[in-house]
Image (cartoon, grey):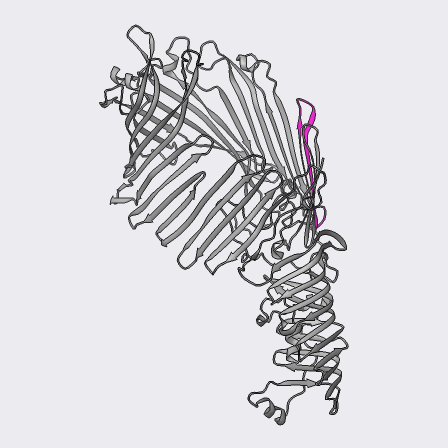
């Protein structure tokens, strides 16, 4: 009897010792029992003594009638027969065992229970000598990857030693409904050693509609990472071509090797008819207790339509030595690579790394090595003095950089030839930051050094004493820059009222570095001076209160002007420094104009305090506040020094923007931009003529928005009716197992379910829970008589609308459209419907573009697909 139970157990079970049984509600739906309905009567002293005998395997049985035929060695258990041996129980209406022929027959709704696995059928027959048996009209469940599968078969046969199990006319699914939403139908199914399942032919059904047909499938049903054949990716069009010119393609055909718990190897191949053949190899290592993770990849693609071969080698490595030290490496032989080492000390953080990239089209190589960054922790010299230094170093090299062409005159009968020129560059930079806080004063200091050297033909225009410009050629150029930036942020004054914030800066006399040396200075450093700059800003806030109305108890109006003033005197540099930064003398960088600028901005905010509910005198909470309207006006600047110049005015701002926000309408934003001047701003020929240049508005409407407006107006919404229970949704599928494939990065896309359309229907679909309407409007235009480039350029006014709602619990709809007021026609439409089918997600999409093209997309996704290890993806487009 024990052999019968062991052999009848379906091989799909992963580990029957876990004892996972079907829950009561699911078993009731399918007709599967969860436990035997019969039991043994209380044992007496004789039975207890027999059960304690050593070196015996006990078989217990009970029935209404027991018949033993001594001559034929046959035992009959009739009416409510129940047999138990070790952890296996069998109950049936009648059980017959003939010892001479080793035949055991169970009839009358036999039910087998074996450590969480349940098997029922119309009849069972088992040969205890050769250990083979069959079950007619079998129904059972088994575990695979954390998912419970239910199988029905017209017949199940168990081979000797339970190494092979056969089933014919089998249907299996993970949907526990009596009428499943989907199932797989196979003519023949074979399990080998409880590790591999092979079925042929296989048809995937959506209810009773066939969706996919395959000649066979096979997969490893064991837990954990296992070696095996990978499922190739293909579509139905690759099996049966829709046209003669269709090019078949097959991807991910290969084998996966699970070498041990730390290392695995993947070998795959891709084939595209008439185009290319690609080989891909990948080895991953993952050592958890050593905090090591990485992979090695290699790919080789051979084109079929053109004699070309492309090879690629990659290495990714991540390692953490301890909580403060880590090492990262990313190397790609064909494109780029990077290395990084990070060490965190108690006094700071050190980062050392480098990178290298190359362009295969022009052999351009860019290398950054080394890169050093040192960030010490803030040093508290005294309680009122803090020093926060920082250091960085970087060396950038570029090789084989294209720098134009050179024409070579021909000789005799030879034509003019063209020579391509290339340069090699090096740029080394070093930066030292030493900010210092002294009480409420902040003193910022930054010193940077940059050394650039270019090896290659360089042409520089130079101006001689007569004003003529001649061109000088250099085989190699160099330049070293030293810059020092410093500023002092003074403490703020009147922080609770005027919010006055002054600052003092020390700037260079003109643009460029503080010190420089190059070929124009003879290799000697020349420098410029420093000049002071002053900045002061004030941003007070003024409040005004207005009486409320309706549900508003009171309204507060806040006005916050932002006024800033900047001053910097003009200055000039020495001729030697001017020649070093501008050898041609054409850009006039030898002096800087004085700056005396004032700017003004404005921010306004209207807030309201709501009245408490009528009759509520016990509430001690602060009344709720809402923002009725917020207006932000961009700043306008005026330069007094610029106004002193001929044919100039002091105005510096050409456009003015106003932004409006409100909490009354979620997502509401209105922005208006005006072009203030007709002509070039800052010149005396420009006229003040505000012109609406840009207008954009957007808002969102939801049921909560309407309810909020109703409460604001004193209207009380009716209590919401609770939604009807969902009688169509079944148990959710188990989470996806990550034991099989874990590939990412490198030179390969992750293997597994995915591809176009896989995300269309995924996600919960709300049922009748309202809508969301988003509307946006944009209007852009420009003055047509300002510049020749803007002449006859029409404006553009467009509006977009996005509406999404759920008419029922399982349906959701989304509509997107845009309308162009200039052409007076809709630019595009997009309409999408999604349906939740318990185990399926279906999506119907209609798209129409501005050019008039129309497309329809239908996608259906099985939510259990990640657990099946069956990667199928097929899309159909009709245009």
Frontmost residue, 197 versus 617: 197
- Single out the residue that lies furthest toward the bottom: 46
Assess whether residue 507 is covered by the magenta stretch: no
* Residue 874: quadrant of the picture: top right
Q: Quadrant of the C terminus?
A: top right
- Single out the residue that lies furthest toward the front: 413
- Residue 174 visible (yes or no): no
Asked if residue 787 is positioned above or below residue 842 in the image, the reply reads above
Residue 242: x and y, percent?
72, 40
Please state if 551 lies on the left or on the right of 423 as rendered.
right
* Residue 285: quadrant of the picture: bottom left
Residue at the image point whose x is 50% and y is 39% from the top: 310
Residue 362: x and y, percent?
45, 30
Residue 236: x and y, percent?
69, 46
Q: Quadrant of the N terminus?
A: bottom right
Frontmost residue, 90 versus 405: 405
Asked if residue 820 is positioned above or below residue 768 in the image, the reply reads above
Residue at the image point whose x is 41% and y is 54% from the top: 292
Assess whether residue 827 is covered by the magenta stretch: yes
Asked if residue 592 is positioned above or below residue 505 in the image, the reply reads above
Q: Which residues are magenta?
A: 807-832
Frontmost residue, 769 versus 703: 769
- Residue 740 visible (yes or no): yes
Frontmost residue, 332 versus 319: 332
* Residue 220: quadrant of the picture: bottom right
Residue 66: x and y, percent?
74, 88
């Amino acid at each position: 009897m024990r052999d019968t139970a062991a052999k009848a157990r379906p091989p799909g079970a992963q580990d029957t010792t876990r004892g996972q049984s079907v829950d009561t509600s699911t078993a009731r739906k399918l007709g599967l029992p969860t436990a035997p309905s019969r039991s043994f009567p209380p044992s007496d002293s004789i039975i207890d003594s027999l059960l304690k005998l050593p070196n015996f395997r006990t078989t217990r049985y009970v029935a209404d009638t027991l018949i033993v035929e001594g001559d034929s060695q046959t035992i009959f258990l009739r009416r409510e027969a129940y047999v138990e041996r070790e952890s296996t129980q069998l109950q049936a209406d009648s059980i017959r065992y003939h010892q001479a022929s080793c035949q055991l027959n169970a009839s009358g709704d036999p039910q087998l229970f074996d450590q969480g696995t349940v098997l029922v059928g119309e009849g069972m027959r088992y040969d205890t000598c050769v250990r083979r048996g069959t079950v007619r009209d079998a129904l059972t469940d088994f575990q695979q990857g954390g998912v419970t599968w239910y199988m029905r078969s017209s017949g199940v046969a168990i081979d000797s030693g339970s190494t092979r199990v056969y089933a014919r006319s089998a249907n299996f699914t993970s949907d526990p409904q009596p009428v499943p939403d989907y199932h797989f139908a196979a003519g023949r199914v074979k399990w080998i050693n409880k590790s591999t399942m092979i079925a042929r032919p296989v048809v995937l059904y959506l209810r009773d509609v066939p969706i996919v047909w395959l000649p066979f499938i096979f997969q490893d049903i064991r837990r954990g990472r296992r070696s095996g054949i990978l499922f190739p990716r293909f579509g139905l069009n690759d099996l049966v071509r829709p046209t003669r010119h269709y090019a078949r393609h097959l991807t991910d055909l290969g084998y996966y090797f699970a070498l041990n718990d730390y290392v695995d190897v993947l070998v795959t191949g891709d084939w595209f008819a008439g185009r290319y053949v690609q080989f891909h190899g990948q080895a991953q290592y993952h050592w958890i207790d050593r905090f090591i993770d990485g992979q090695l990849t290699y790919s080789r693609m051979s084109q079929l339509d053109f004699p070309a071969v492309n090879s690629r080698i990659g290495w990714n490595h991540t390692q953490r030595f301890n909580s403060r030290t880590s090492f990262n490496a990313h190397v790609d032989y064909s494109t780029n690579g990077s290395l990084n080492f990070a060490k965190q000390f108690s006094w700071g953080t050190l980062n050392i790394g480098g990178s290298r990239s190359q362009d295969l089209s022009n052999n351009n190589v860019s290398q950054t090595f080394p890169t050093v960054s040192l960030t010490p922790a803030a040093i508290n010299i005294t309680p009122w003095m803090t020093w926060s230094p920082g250091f960085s170093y970087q060396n950038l090299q570029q090789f084989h950089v294209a720098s134009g062409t050179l024409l070579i005159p021909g000789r005799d009968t030879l034509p003019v030839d063209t020579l391509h020129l290339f340069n090699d560059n090096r740029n080394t930079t070093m930066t030292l930051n030493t900010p210092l806080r002294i009480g409420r004063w902040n003193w910022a200091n930054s010193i940077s050094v940059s050394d650039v050297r270019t090896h290659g033909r360089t042409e520089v225009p130079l101006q001689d004493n007569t004003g003529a410009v001649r061109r000088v050629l250099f085989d190699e150029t160099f330049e070293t820059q030293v810059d020092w930036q410093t500023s002092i942020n003074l403490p703020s004054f009147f922080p609770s009222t005027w919010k006055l914030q002054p600052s003092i800066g020390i700037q260079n006399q003109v643009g460029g570095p503080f010190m420089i040396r190059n070929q124009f200075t003879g290799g000697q450093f020349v420098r410029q001076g420093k000049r002071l700059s002053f900045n002061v800003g004030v941003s007070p806030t003024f409040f005004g209160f207005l009486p409320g109305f309706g549900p508003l108890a009171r309204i507060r109006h806040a006005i916050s002007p932002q006024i800033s003033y900047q001053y910097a005197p003009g200055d000039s540099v020495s001729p030697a420094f001017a020649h070093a930064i501008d050898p041609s003398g054409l850009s006039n960088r030898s002096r800087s104009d004085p700056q005396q600028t004032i700017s003004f901005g404005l921010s306004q905010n209207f807030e309201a305090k709501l009245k408490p509910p009528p009759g509520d005198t016990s509430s001690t909470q602060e009344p709720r506040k809402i923002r009725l309207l917020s207006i932000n006006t961009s700043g306008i600047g005026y330069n007094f020094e610029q106004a002193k110049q001929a044919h100039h005015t002091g105005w510096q701002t050409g456009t003015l923007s106003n932004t409006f926000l409100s909490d009354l309408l979620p997502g509401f934003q209105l922005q208006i931009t005006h072009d203030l001047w007709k002509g070039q701003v800052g010149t005396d020929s420009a006229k003040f003529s505000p012109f609406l240049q840009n207008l954009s508005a957007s808002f969102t409407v939801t049921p909560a928005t309407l309810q909020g407006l109703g409460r604001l107006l004193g209207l009380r919404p009716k209590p919401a009716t609770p939604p009807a229970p969902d009688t169509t949704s079944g148990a959710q599928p188990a989470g996806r197992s990550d034991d099989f494939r874990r590939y990412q990065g490198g030179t390969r896309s992750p293997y597994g379910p995915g591809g176009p359309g896989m995300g269309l229907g995924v996600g919960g679909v709300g049922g009748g829970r309202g809508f969301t309407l988003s509307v946006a409007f944009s209007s852009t235009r420009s003055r047509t008589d300002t510049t020749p480039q803007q002449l006859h350029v029409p404006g553009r006014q467009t509006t977009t609308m996005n509406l999404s709602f759920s008419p029922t619990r399982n349906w959701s709809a989304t509509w997107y459209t845009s309308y162009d007021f200039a052409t007076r026609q809709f630019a595009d439409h997009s309409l999408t419907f999604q349906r939740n089918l318990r185990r399926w997600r279906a999506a119907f999409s209609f798209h129409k573009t501005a050019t008039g093209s129309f497309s329809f997309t239908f996608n259906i996704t099985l939510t259990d697909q990640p657990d099946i290890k069956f990667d199928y993806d097929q899309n159909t487009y009709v245009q």
